[in-house]
Amino acid sequence: MTRYSAVLLAAIGASLAVPAFAQFAKPEDAIKYRKNALFVMQQNFGRVAAMAAGKAPFDAKIAADSAAVAEFVAKLPWEGFGPGTDKGDTKAKPEIWTDKAKFDDYAKKMEAEMSKLSIAAKTGSLDSIKVAVNATGGTCKSCHDDFRAK
Ligand code: ASC
């Protein structure tokens, strides 16, 4: 590979928001990565959900910003579920790896609903946010029911 093509490849790689083939130094790093991504997502989603539930005062700007962060971070956890990351400090069930198509489908559904929530939050309509929070929360729950140990 020429020096030029190496630099070009690096630049293309850097321009992609989510790396297609993530490399982790060790399985524990992948587990930490996905847990931290899910935590950051949940904190942002939870802030909007609290507003939707009337547990926090509705602030349209905070809702829109938080939903946008959650929408982006929702893309990140999945690369942390690679082969060999089923054992360790995790509640992830083995079915994630044996029934990967179903897990991936849940992940895609959650991402799609999180995107809709972000769109709803940008409109500033609390009623739309409530609908989208419920739909999104449902996708969190169905995946946890099937793929997360108690
Ligand atoms: C959250 C969170 C979940 C979902 C779920 C919705 O904020 O951490 O797992 O919402 O409770 O049913």
Image (tube, grey):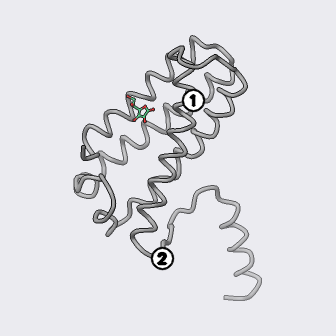
Q: Which of 128 and 90 is in front in this view?
A: 90
Circle 1 crowding by C-alpha within 10 Å: few under 14, some 14–19, many from 20: some
Residue 7 pos. (x, y %): 74, 78
Q: In the displayed structure, would residue 132 be above or below residue 89?
A: above
Numbered circle sitting on residue 68:
none
Q: In the displayed structure, would residue 11 be above or below residue 69?
A: below
Q: Residue at x 50, y 67 (%)?
A: 21
Which mark lies nearer to you, 1 or 2? Answer: 1
Mark sitting earlier along the chain (1/2): 2
State left or right for residue 69 relative to residue 94.
Answer: right
* Residue found at the very far right of the displayed protein: 4
Q: How far apart are marks 1 and 2 (CA)?
A: 33 Å
Image quadrant where one finds the C terminus? top left
Q: In which quarter of the image is residue 105?
A: top left
* Residue found at the very far top of the displayed protein: 127
Residue 55 pos. (x, y %): 53, 18
Q: Which of 3 and 24 is in front in this view?
A: 24
Label 1: element kind: helix
Three-letter amino acid code of the residue under disc 2: Ala
* Residue found at the very far bottom of the displayed protein: 2
Numbered circle sitting on residue 47:
1
Label 2: element kind: loop
Ligand 1 quarter of the rendering: top left
Image quadrant where one finds the N terminus? bottom right
State left or right for residue 84 relative to residue 112.
Answer: left
| Residue at numbered disc 2 | 25
Residue 48 pos. (x, y %): 57, 26
Q: Which residue is drawn at 55% across and 28% down?
A: 116
Q: In the displayed structure, would residue 68 be above or below residue 17?
A: above
